[in-house]
Image (spheres, rainbow, N blue to C red):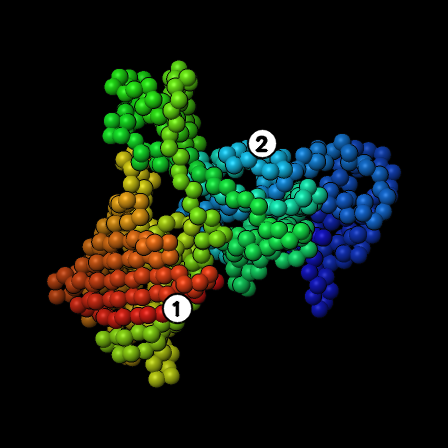
């Protein structure tokens, strides 16, 4: 109870706000806090305020009822009404989102279901959702936001609301897909989690983006009711994928799998893009025209085709309304949607549905942690044979076969490459940050969410020689991509790099980059990249890089890298990557 931990100098609660506790010493004295609550439970309350103060602790009240007789003073409380309606619990996972650093790894929250067995195609929009997040001031400076979040300068808290509000934020505004993990808990256990989560809405915690975050707090609520740890962190960070895999490996009290079902809940945008990919050319033209002029007549389409176009237009306009900040534009889009809905109502007797997205593999069974350590054997033209150790704290990388993350995208922070030869280790490269998004949807221009782009900064050695100096660099690029057959992603990018003086490269030089990323079966991903870079002698130098990564076990991959360049390094690397 109350998130206490025992240390050499006594007890200490993770809850930071003193007003959560009944006694001034409640943060460090659980015995005194419990004693004072028992005394409170035995009192005769004379005002609604006293009853309200007592009833804000539903988990404590349930605990006392097991050990002593207390009056049911909270029978008519709205809190108790919410708890009594809970029949089951689902863990919701919203996939990664590049618009917010705190959401790169995805996000987890709890849903208190009013159904014992949630139905496959029912979202339960009126169910209560329990969300944990940082309390961030409005218009916070982005740099301050990242630094404060990393070093724990924000407070974290639980909030509850109807689930449809979460779908507006995550699915409509941020275009993120959900997965619902229905847990195999009985009604009593589900209501115990609900009581604890609702009680903790009055508590504040220290919030850390990497270690004490939504994943941590959701895990603790589930672990408390099971009486054992659900998933362990690695001591540095604790991310949604670790929790999902932990849930997938757990059993309930009867020995059955803790996860009873996983449901895929695609965002409206995912549904729209899938519908567009399956439209005929004339349906796409009609959709584009309808969104330009909602009163346009689709005379050359059949009733079924018209209905499919109208359904897609409605999804797009609903998505646009939710994302529009300007009040006048929002009202104009709302009126356009009304026209579409009115026309759609006239086709209600026509049977026509858009094609729904295919269900991806479950994140907990196929998703991987991007963070990894690799040990490789390297054959290098300049440095000869040696070994390399790479430590990459990462959201993911372009060769990680991740499910439930942003496809073909990279977010590395403080990636370290160490080489070892003749018993000596040296730093080969330090990537302070690398962000790369190499996949956007292959649909008409109106629906493209953005362009492929790249940003990287750090320090590296020009060559493999022992005396090669470290050079700082900053690189950025932007381009476009095209997805072929759903599996092969091709891209083209224009890039510029600013770096220390180099024997080959100018201080500021431009590059042209072309690449291809392909899934080969379910376990292998390949990446081919060609780059033409402006050299100091006014010529273009080329670099060819090919790499593959193959899953060989639950946490281990086999990685192969080949690089051929007419400047800097040429090498072949073969290694084992362990994800953690």
Asked if disc 1 and disc 2 are in contact, CB closer than 8 Å, the reply is no
> Hey, which residue is sitting farthest left in the picture?
538
Seen at 30% across and 26% down, the residue is 287
Instruction: Say whether residue 282 is left or right of residue 222.
Output: left
Query: Could you tell me which secondary element the residue under label 1 belongs to?
Result: strand
Q: How many marks?
A: 2
Other residues around mark 2 within 10 Å, as few (<14) / some (14–19) / many (≥20): some
Instruction: Say whether residue 304 is left or right of residue 132.
Output: left
Marks 1 and 2, how far apart at CA: 47 Å
For residue 576, the mark is 1
Mark nearer the N terminus (1 vs 2): 2
Other residues around mark 1 within 10 Å, as few (<14) / some (14–19) / many (≥20): many
Please tell me which residue lies in front, 144 or 382: 382
Q: Nearer the viewer, mark 1 or mark 2?
A: 1
Position of residue 1 measured from the top left corner of the image (x, y, whole percent): 72, 53
Quadrant assignment, res 545: bottom left
Position of residue 378 measured from the top left corner of the image (x, y, whole percent): 31, 74
Seen at 77% across and 41% down, the residue is 54
* Residue 555 visible from this viewpoint: yes
Quadrant assignment, res 531: bottom left
Position of residue 107 measured from the top left corner of the image (x, y, whole percent): 50, 47
> Residue at label 2?
126
Seen at 30% across and 70% down, the residue is 573
Query: Could you tell me which secondary element the residue under label 2 belongs to?
Result: loop
Position of residue 577 measured from the top left corner of the image (x, y, whole percent): 40, 66
Q: Is residue 115 above or below residue 241?
A: above
């Amino acid at each position: 109870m109350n998130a206490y931990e025992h240390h050499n100098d006594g007890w200490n609660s993770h809850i930071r706000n003193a007003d959560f506790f009944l006694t001034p010493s409640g943060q460090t004295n659980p015995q005194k806090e419990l004693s004072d609550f028992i005394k409170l439970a035995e009192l005769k309350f004379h005002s609604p305020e006293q009853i309200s103060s007592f009833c804000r602790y539903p988990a404590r009240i349930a605990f006392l009822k097991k050990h002593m007789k207390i009056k049911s003073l909270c029978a008519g409380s709205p809190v108790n009404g919410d708890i009594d309606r809970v029949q089951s619990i689902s863990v919701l996972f919203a996939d990664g989102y590049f618009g917010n650093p705190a959401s790169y790894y995805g996000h987890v929250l709890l849903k208190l279901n009013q159904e014992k067995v949630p139905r496959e195609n029912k979202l339960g929009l009126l169910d209560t959702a329990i969300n944990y997040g940082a309390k961030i001031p409005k218009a916070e400076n982005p740099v301050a936001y990242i630094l404060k979040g990393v070093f724990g300068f924000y407070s974290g808290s639980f909030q509850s609301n109807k689930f449809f509000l979460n779908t507006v934020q995550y699915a409509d505004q941020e275009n993120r897909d959900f997965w619902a993990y229905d847990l195999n808990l009985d009604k009593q256990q589900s209501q115990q989690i609900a009581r604890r989560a609702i009680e903790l809405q009055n508590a504040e915690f220290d919030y850390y983006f990497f270690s004490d975050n939504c994943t941590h707090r959701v895990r603790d609520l589930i672990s408390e009711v099971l009486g054992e740890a659900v998933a362990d962190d690695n001591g540095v960070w604790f991310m949604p994928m670790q929790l999902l895999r932990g849930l997938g490996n757990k059993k309930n009290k009867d020995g059955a799998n803790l996860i009873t079902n996983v449901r895929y809940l695609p965002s409206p945008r995912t549904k729209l893009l899938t519908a567009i990919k399956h439209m005929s050319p004339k349906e796409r033209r009609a959709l584009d025209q309808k969104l330009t002029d909602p009163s346009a007549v689709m005379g050359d389409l059949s009733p079924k085709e018209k209905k499919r176009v109208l359904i897609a237009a409605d999804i797009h306009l609903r998505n646009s309304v939710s994302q529009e900040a300007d009040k006048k534009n929002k009202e104009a889009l709302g009126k356009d949607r009304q026209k579409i809905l009115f026309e759609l109502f006239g086709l209600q007797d026509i049977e026509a549905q858009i094609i729904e997205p295919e269900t991806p593999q479950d994140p907990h069974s196929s998703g991987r942690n991007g963070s990894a350590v690799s040990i490789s054997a390297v054959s290098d033209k300049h440095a000869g044979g040696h070994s390399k150790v790479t430590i990459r704290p990462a959201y993911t990388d372009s060769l990680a076969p991740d499910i439930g993350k942003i496809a073909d995208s990279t977010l590395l922070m403080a990636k370290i490459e160490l080489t070892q030869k003749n018993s000596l280790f040296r730093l080969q490269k330090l990537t302070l940050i690398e962000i790369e998004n190499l996949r956007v949807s292959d649909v008409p221009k109106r629906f493209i969410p953005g362009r492929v782009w790249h940003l990287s900064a750090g320090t590296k050695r020009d060559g493999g020689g022992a005396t090669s100096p470290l050079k700082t660099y900053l690189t950025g690029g932007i381009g476009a991509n095209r997805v072929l057959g759903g599996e092969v992603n091709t891209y083209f990018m224009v890039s510029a790099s600013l770096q220390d003086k180099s024997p080959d490269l100018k201080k500021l030089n431009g590059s042209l980059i072309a690449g291809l990323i392909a899934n080969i079966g379910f376990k292998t991903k390949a990446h081919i990249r060609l780059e033409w870079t402006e050299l100091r002698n006014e010529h273009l130098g080329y670099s060819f890089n090919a790499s593959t990564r193959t899953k060989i076990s639950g946490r281990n991959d086999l990685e192969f890298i080949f690089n051929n360049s007419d400047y800097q390094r040429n090498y072949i690397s073969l290694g084992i990557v362990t994800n953690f």
